[in-house]
Image (cartoon, coloured by chain):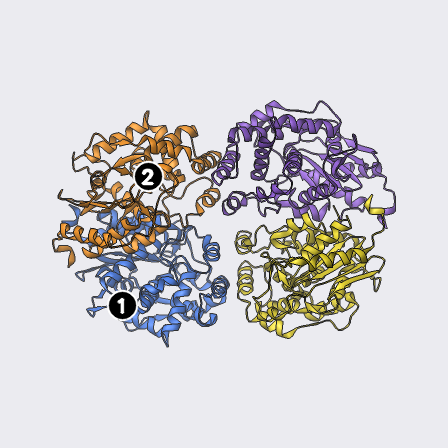
Chain colours: A blue, B orange, C purple, D yellow
Amino acid sequence: MAEFVPINYQTVLASVIEQAKNTKSLGEVASYIPELAYVEPSKLGIHLITVNNDHFHEGDANEKFSIQSISKVLSLTLSFKALGNDLWQRVGIEPSGTAFNSLVQLEYEQGIPRNPFINAGAIVICDVLVSQFDNPKKEILNLCCKLSGNADIAINAAVAQSELDSSFRNRSLANLMKDFGNIDNDIDTVLDVYIYLCAIEMTCKEMAQTFMFLAQNGVNPLTKEAVVTVSEAKRLNAILQLCGFYDEAGEFSFKVGLPGKSGVGGGIIAIHPQKYSVAVWSPKLNDKGNSYLGMKMLESLTTISQSSIF
Amino acid sequence: MAEFVPINYQTVLASVIEQAKNTKSLGEVASYIPELAYVEPSKLGIHLITVNNDHFHEGDANEKFSIQSISKVLSLTLSFKALGNDLWQRVGIEPSGTAFNSLVQLEYEQGIPRNPFINAGAIVICDVLVSQFDNPKKEILNLCCKLSGNADIAINAAVAQSELDSSFRNRSLANLMKDFGNIDNDIDTVLDVYIYLCAIEMTCKEMAQTFMFLAQNGVNPLTKEAVVTVSEAKRLNAILQLCGFYDEAGEFSFKVGLPGKSGVGGGIIAIHPQKYSVAVWSPKLNDKGNSYLGMKMLESLTTISQSSIF
Amino acid sequence: MAEFVPINYQTVLASVIEQAKNTKSLGEVASYIPELAYVEPSKLGIHLITVNNDHFHEGDANEKFSIQSISKVLSLTLSFKALGNDLWQRVGIEPSGTAFNSLVQLEYEQGIPRNPFINAGAIVICDVLVSQFDNPKKEILNLCCKLSGNADIAINAAVAQSELDSSFRNRSLANLMKDFGNIDNDIDTVLDVYIYLCAIEMTCKEMAQTFMFLAQNGVNPLTKEAVVTVSEAKRLNAILQLCGFYDEAGEFSFKVGLPGKSGVGGGIIAIHPQKYSVAVWSPKLNDKGNSYLGMKMLESLTTISQSSIF
Amino acid sequence: MAEFVPINYQTVLASVIEQAKNTKSLGEVASYIPELAYVEPSKLGIHLITVNNDHFHEGDANEKFSIQSISKVLSLTLSFKALGNDLWQRVGIEPSGTAFNSLVQLEYEQGIPRNPFINAGAIVICDVLVSQFDNPKKEILNLCCKLSGNADIAINAAVAQSELDSSFRNRSLANLMKDFGNIDNDIDTVLDVYIYLCAIEMTCKEMAQTFMFLAQNGVNPLTKEAVVTVSEAKRLNAILQLCGFYDEAGEFSFKVGLPGKSGVGGGIIAIHPQKYSVAVWSPKLNDKGNSYLGMKMLESLTTISQSSIF
């Protein structure tokens, strides 16, 4: 069976990037934050790390970009470690259905967001971090540094400022949840953390390394430390699988077949548990807000290698 | 790593059923169809078949029960084979968000159901079968017989009649989709097929055997015939993972970590690709309409065996 | 004050029709029922009857057209007489908000339609008529004949057949309400009455005469019989004011300032209690489904005569 | 006919208040703002002023209370005068359907509130006032003083502070509209005006006097000045009729039959154009947020006097 044939990932990645280069990217670079719109749209990179610590990459895999919502996996990890299953009193783990529903569902469901990756849910997670840590920003950044093996991970201040200036929608969500009693701290403090997290920058290589713990039963392979337990790692992957792509979670599962998370900076991280972690980057987004070529590259990857979790 | 330790499934299943027997079942037997309410609520069974064709079972694994919505996996399989990816013009592959949304989303999304497992989507699938086959009922039943290795699979006529008498909601959905142009055939004909499928009866053993093709890259292990391609099998599993449990898909993924599908008869089928297929049965349903103890048994199974797709 | 200056309605109507003739009609003739699309789009008529039985008219006021939803005022009248305030257990008296909400609200509000003029509400009213009368069609037609003073009021059979052939949406609504227990009779029987009512034909003159009872405290001026009590007449006018124009009730109140009801045949009836009843007709509908020039004519009427209920 | 019999309003009001005293008030005093909860629940007052300047009153008609949302009629009046029909680019004039829809509809309708009386609409109106006037608070207060004939109208600072401390929902609405580009000014500035308006206090007598201009074709009877034109007065009454009672507009029209506006302080103002203005006060609110006995008193008033606009 396919599983026992050793896959030559370098050959696979070469095909993946070749196909992507020959595919017209139909999306648009994110523009809702002015700073994000300055990125070169033709950037294209992929970096894959196996559980044996073999690295493979193609294209612009060593350039920094804004990881945006991908950081929500890390803030979820920290808050899940801190509160355990009590966390689910504050936020659900169900797909959100359609994008437009965010405010609707939030109102019906009395301020409890459907999952930690829609904006409302990620804001609740930041509220948890503010309650749990003296310096939540530093806590997240430390985790990024440890997991990525790079002490220099930082945020892009211009992106953070740009996001702050256009945060009316998030401020609306936060106030609605506060009205329902699901935000404990000051809204400005919570949104400050939220915006900070989204402005973290990484390369594909750093991103793939950062999320290796989800491919290795919760263990950071660089330090051999358990970031989370085996069971928690499986559960985090399950949440990524069901909720990582907003209104395109089904599409991503169908075509790629791996747990993953996208960001409007054009990055996507995907995990093949017990096999590899892979990060891709291409700035143009499809109309659901996910990287157009990033999804294509991951689809090629699992199709060519005939390997997905399903 | 856990994966390479041979698991003694008989011991695991014994623990699973023991735990279930010691757990108070909090749900209620389905009552919306009078016939379903007659079942003995304490029934409890599990049957697991590995890809090596080893069988394990506990409890009432050899009693027939109404598989209800689990049959929707088979009708989806037939229509996906018939139309290929053109099928997704008619029905989506995204989770439906909340249960209450069914009519709402159907109206917004112009009569295109979110996925093939919500009632509206399953009705569209039946419409496809009516268009594709001279005798769609026989086609499905033949597939059941071939896959289960039992030529005597049949429907419960009293259940079908009971469902027919209380089909106003489904008739509402079908008429709404017909208004949007997404039902080609006569509504009575389509609903007749829909109701027939839901009235199929199987034992846990038959059900586990029937869905082995999804654990074995699309191949029916009894006949070695390819029911669907490798790629199609993976995609069907992806749809089960994302959409198989209505508004509890996230919960099931989080706690069980396998693609699966439930029915209001109290049955659940779950697939561990390349490992096993497992069927459970316990008639009492939780408030989301999924078997209360069935979900508990599957959670025990993947927890004790430390094995899920994540 | 304007009220005490006798208004020369003939002069007013001449201005009204003149203005309408000089206004480009931006709407479209209703096409969802093929038969309705055959009407000559340039038809334009108005007929006003005062409480002193003075008649004034201009344009095509003596041509028959399909009164469509305007008949819902008559079916409401009959069922309100029959059940009194018990009727409001079955249907509300609140505006429906937006058009798209019909199915949404019906689902949330457990099958109780917001008001008797949205389709769902009018179907419930027909269900009441089927329960109350041996021959509800004849009952309504008799009422039309008595009120209009014309024994020959009839339906257009081609319109009724055309509507029957495209009644999937209404069938969806009826089945949903039946599922909630808010339809007592057979759905086909109820929809047959519903479709019959919509196919009634009248001239502007007949329509203005028919609804005089709402301008005269419930009394049919032709027979001096009380159709409804004073209080009931006021309440019917209140429902017309709040719910008579679907999602344009506010606009109609704002610009015209009279209780009224429109139909997709291009007719509108409006009532100035204690003053007059007026019917207008122009087949082209605006995007909310109300007669474009019909609304303009009524706006001119109350503007020129400086007289509305407000 | 009833219209020409002179009505003895003193006798009518005596009956109205007698009936109210003998009716168990089923509602609850508003508690969402702590300060409002301190009011004596048994307060009961009514004051009616005819267009001949005859005054009639019963009960606690000379005690101040928080007029709350009733002030929205005055802010609407000012902004309508300032912008004319351009105002409707910013806010609609349609009933809002159900209460729960506020955020839903606001999201669908791209930040344009359905009408000026739901919270979102009243916030837009305040945004208009901030743009139009150097000191919008003073402008409104001046208008109150002029219309009521009392130079001492003021706000209750404790109520304003209390409202400010619990304004998360309104802040959510304002941010959502700002995201859609429908708030021009700083949100804190706009909400400060909004909260100020709601904290205005009046007696029933002052309130009835204040709104006499809507009963007298736009003219302030104390000064003979036109506050608005005849046409604008009619249009304001139409908006009150359709939108003045949130999700109970139909009920109020059906039972009372006058344009009106309620506030959570337990006050209601109602207008009989060309006849009278009437204010009632009873603090306990029904489950739709309107004064329970206030609505009963107005229903008695129009029932006993057999007089409504319908």
**Mark drawn on residue D149:** none
Q: Quick one: label 1, few (<14), some, or many (20+) residues within 10 Å?
A: many
Left or right, A178 with respect to D293, comes to: left
Q: Is residue C83 visible?
A: yes
Q: Quick one: label 2, few (<14), some, or many (20+) residues within 10 Å?
A: few
Does residue D98 sit above or below D144 in this rendering? above
Left or right, C102 with respect to A94, comes to: right
Q: Give the x, y percent position of residue A134.
A: 37, 77
Q: Chain of mark 1?
A: A
- Give the structural element (helix, strand or loop) at label 1: helix
Q: Are marks 2 and 1 on the same chain?
A: no
Type of amino acid at the residue the image marks with label 1: Ser
Q: Nearer the viewer, residue B277 or A173?
A: B277
Q: Is residue C297 visible?
A: no
Does residue A4 sit above or below A214 in this rendering? above
Residue highlighted by disc 1? A148
Residue highlighted by disc 2? B38
Does residue B137 sit above or below D208 in this rendering? above
Q: Give the x, y percent position of residue D107.
A: 52, 54
Q: Chain of mark 2?
A: B
Q: Give the x, y percent position of residue C54.
A: 84, 34
Residue drawn at point x = 70 percent, y = 29 percent? C144
Q: Residue furthest bottom?
A: A134
Type of amino acid at the residue the image marks with label 2: Tyr
Q: Nearer the viewer, residue D66 or D13?
A: D13
